[in-house]
Image (cartoon, helix red, strand yellow):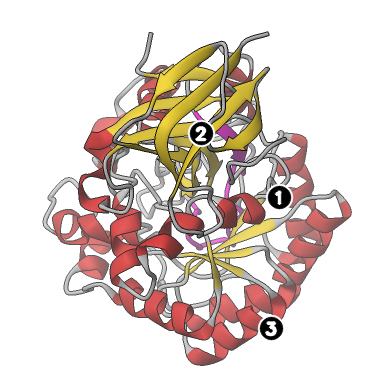
Amino acid sequence: MTRRVFHGGRVFDGTGAALEDADVVIEDGRIVEVGPGLDGDEGVDCVGKAVLPGLFDCHVHLAMRYEDFDEAKTLHEPFSMPFFRAHINLRRTIELGITTVRDASGADAGLRDAVEEGTLVGPRMQVSVAMLSMTGGHSDPWLPSGGRGIWDIEYPGMPSGVCDGVDGVSRTTREVIRAGADVIKIASSGGFLSPGDDPMEPNFSQEEVDAIVRTAADLGTWVMSHAHGAEGIKRAVRAGVRSIDHGTYLDEEAAAMMVERGTWLVPTLTAGDTTEELANDPHVAEQVREKLRGLGRPEFDAMRLAAEAGVKVAMGTDCPVAPHGTNLNELVHMAANGFTPEQALVAATSSAAELMGLQDELGTLEPGKRADVVVVDGDPFAFETLKERVGQVWKDGVRVVPFA
């Protein structure tokens, strides 16, 4: 059993404490010691570098690509193409130091399990499989032409998420969990990238959201809620969802409710980086482009409000709304909109681990935790250039970046 020591670097342990000169020792896939002057059988030279816990992205779509917003092109591709391309998204994500993700729909249990068994190299995954949507809501693929959009294609292991009524949403929640979901994803408001709904309007009644959360809880599962408009946020918070994802039009009342109930915000600020580009892209549906024109960056206001109110925040990006590989822009945006750089990096490590229920295993560099270790050149808080400075990524004590 090899005792490997990361020596000579400065350690960010994930708690928000200041960087410390320390060594990190891993053995048999676990961290066994953190402190100065440690020894081991093999060494990793970290002089001039920082040593971080593995990072998290709590809202990502690893089965989708930015290029897929050209729906006409995608509709004429073979059905199996997304499965064969997924490894590219996985690798682009883990090479950023992101070793754990919560997939926010589109990835089935097979993708998660292929990573777990080592068939594919990528971050470990919690998957939501299919997003639950009301008829006419954010994930309803119906089109006026009689066709169907590309975002809710059913196949074995990927049930339809479109459902209505207390009985209907309860049944679909059970079906998605049966398909292998680790977390239930719902749309409690409309969205920007779906052509037929309004992101300001709530989706699902209060009774329906209550039923989803209750049904999921009975089966030991949390609920994450896509929500832009204030009423959609509030319905989800009242029902007891684990997190509000996006929260674009968060208001003071909703923020106070989230603080009172301990609801997390996953702000996905990176998704706004491509708003203008998508609004000007003729391959994107005109109804979507119209919603994006002149939108600006209201999510920045929501992030600042959440930070001031004391809402718990975990990092998530909504990639590929901005392309996979741009995930670390989320740290830049959080640090510019209410958080210090230290708080932003906590949101990507220990806070994210807590949101996902993995705080006993991941998120900090301390003895007993799984050995997810990221080595970066220079200052870990210089987020603008962090992507280029990720030198090594270790997952469960195995080096996965640079790729073999």
- N-term mark: 1 or 3: 3
259 and 16: which is toward the camera: 16
Structural distance between the alpha carbons of marks 1 and 2: 27 Å
Residue 260 numbered mark, or none: 3
Looking at the picture, does residue 168 appear above or below residue 73?
below
Which residue is labeled 2 in the image? 23
Please rate how many residues cluster around mark 1, counting C-alpha atoms within 10 Å: few if below 14, some from 14 to 19, many from 20: few
Instruction: State the extent of the magenta-drawn residues as a range.
Output: 123-140
Looking at the picture, does residue 400 appear above or below residue 275?
above
Instruction: Tell me the amino acid under the disc marked 3.
Output: Glu
Residue 143 horizontal side relative to residue 369, left or right: left
Of tags 2 and 3, the one toward the viewer is: 2
Structural distance between the alpha carbons of marks 1 and 3: 19 Å
The residue drawn where x is 38% and y is 8% is 404
Q: Residue furthest front?
A: 37
Structural distance between the alpha carbons of marks 2 and 3: 39 Å
Provide residue 11's location: percent of width, then percent of height: 46, 43
